[in-house]
Amino acid sequence: MNKKQIALYLIFGGAAIILLTFISSIFSFFGNHPWLGLAFVSIGVGVFLLAFD
């Protein structure tokens, strides 16, 4: 492997770890605030239905 390929693997690996941490914190926030989570889910479903209608 060359240095460029190793650098890309490290960048994507770090980005994946940051993304998983961010997603887990969002899920824990919605777990602590279920009504707010339900509101965001309903907004997301509404946007999805409007976009793919």
Image (cartoon, helix red, strand yellow):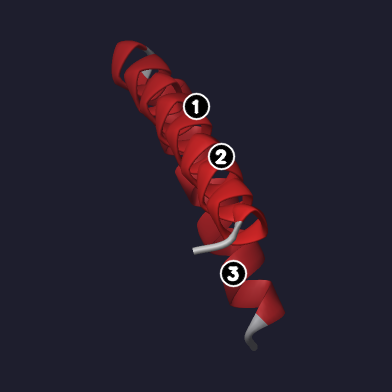
Q: Check disc 3 and report its element: helix, strand or loop.
A: helix
Q: Residues within 10 Å of mark 3 (few under 14, many from 20)?
A: few
- The answer to whether mark 2 and mark 1 are in CB contact below 8 A is no
Front residue of this view, candidates 33 and 29: 29
Apparent side of residue 37 relative to residue 51 in the rendered image (left or right)? left
Q: From the viewer's perspective, is residue 14 above or below residue 4?
A: above
Apparent side of residue 48 relative to residue 21 in the rendered image (left or right)? right
Residue under label 3: 48
Residue under label 2: 15
Q: Mark 3 or mark 1, which has the lower sequence index? A: 1
x, y (%) of residue 15?
56, 39
Q: From the viewer's perspective, is residue 36 above or below residue 15?
A: above
User: Hey, which residue is sitting farthest bottom in the picture?
Assistant: 53
Q: From the viewer's perspective, is residue 29 above or below residue 41?
A: above
Q: Give amino acid for label 2.
A: Ala
x, y (%) of residue 20?
41, 35
Task: Please give the label number shown on residue 22.
Answer: 1
**Where is residue 25, by image quadrant?**
top left
- The answer to whether mark 3 and mark 1 are in CB contact below 8 A is no
Q: Give amino acid for label 3.
A: Phe
Q: Give amino acid for label 1.
A: Phe
Front residue of this view, candidates 30 and 23: 23
Q: Residues within 10 Å of mark 2 (few under 14, many from 20)?
A: few
Apparent side of residue 9 relative to residue 38 in the rendered image (left or right)? right
Residue drawn at the location 53% of the way across and 42% of the way down: 10
Mark whose residue sits in front, 3 or 1:
1
**Where is residue 11, by image quadrant?**
top right
Front residue of this view, candidates 50 and 27: 27
